[in-house]
Each structure stands twice: as C-alpha cells, then as structure tokens.
Image (cartoon, helix red, strand yellow):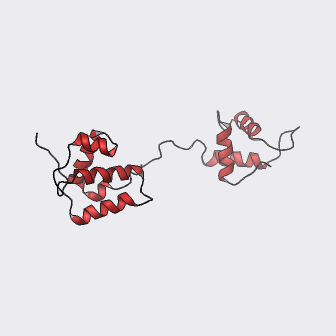
Amino acid sequence: MNKLYHVRMSEEERKRVQIVQNEATTPESIRKRCSVLLLADECIGRPPNQEEIAKRSGVSDVTVYKLIKDYEVEGLAYCLRRREHKTPPNPPIVTGEKEARIIALACGKPPEGYARWTVRLLREKIVELEIMDQIGRETVRNTLKKRNLSLT
C-alpha cells in the first residue's frame, strides 16, 4: 500500500528535532512527537511501519499518522508546538465579585461565640449568605491562599 504522507527532514531540521528532544525542559508529549518524527524520517533509510513507530515511541498509531500528515501539510514548527487552548478546560468556580465578597467576609468579624474564622465556618456562611449555592472547603482555602490571606 502506498503511503500518502512522508517525512523527509533536512539535516538542519533533524538536528533541531534532536535538540528539542534532548532539552530538559521539553514536555513528554513533545519528546514523543520528536521520537516519532526521527523514526519516520525517510532520508536516513527505510523507516519502520507506523505500528512499529507507535510502539517504540509510546503513542498510538493514529497519533503517528496524524503527526506525519501534520509534518507534510503544516511543517516542522507546527508539529513541535505546544497545544494552546482558547479557554481553560475547567472554568474557575470563584470569580470577581464572589471572590471579593469571600475575602471581605474572611477579613470581617467572626460569628458570635468564635474567636476567629475557620474555613468550615466561612464555607457555611458563604452558603448561608447565598454568595454561592455550594462551595467546598478546599475552594475557600484556595481562594484565601491566592490572596495570601491567613485565618490565624
């Protein structure tokens, strides 16, 4: 069966891929992409089939196919880029006004009978005042920590 896409890297591209692969700060996903490209390069000889490349690189054979296609269609820089998301995968639970109200509550006077606020007391008061319908203790703690606030 004839291959639709081929990887034929110049010597400069090959060196660049090897440098990126060996850098300490390179993420594992990009290291795997480098490995696939180096194994699929036809300029150094006949490359192994895509299943073998996938096994050696620790990726799926679909990933190998898509990466080889991206190399031929988009180029090397496209293959080695970090994937950027337009929006974060999980939007923040506490934003703007809610955060300000939580911080104001934590900086205020504690409830009667208590010497200071605790995270649990804050959580209960946030729900009671209907700042939020529900909120976890960890979310309250992280909100305070983000602003370097301590309850002690």
Q: Quadrant of residue 127?
A: top right
Seen as rendered, the residue at the extreme bottom is 12
Front-lying residue, 129 or 119: 119
Q: Residue at x 14, y 45 (%)?
A: 4
Depicted 14 relative to depicted 91: above or below: below
Q: In the figure, is residue 2 to the left or right of 105?
A: left
Count up the numbered dots.
Answer: 0
82 and 58: which one is in front?
58
Q: Provide residue 119's location: percent of width, then percent of height.
A: 74, 41
Give residue 22's position: percent from left, percent from top: 38, 59
Q: What residue is drawn where x is 17% and y is 57%? A: 43
Question: Closer to the camera, 134 or 90?
Answer: 90
Q: Quadrant of the N terminus?
A: top left
Q: Give x and y (percent) for residue 17.
A: 31, 60
Q: Residue furthest right?
A: 113
Q: Residue at x 25, y 41 (%)?
A: 52
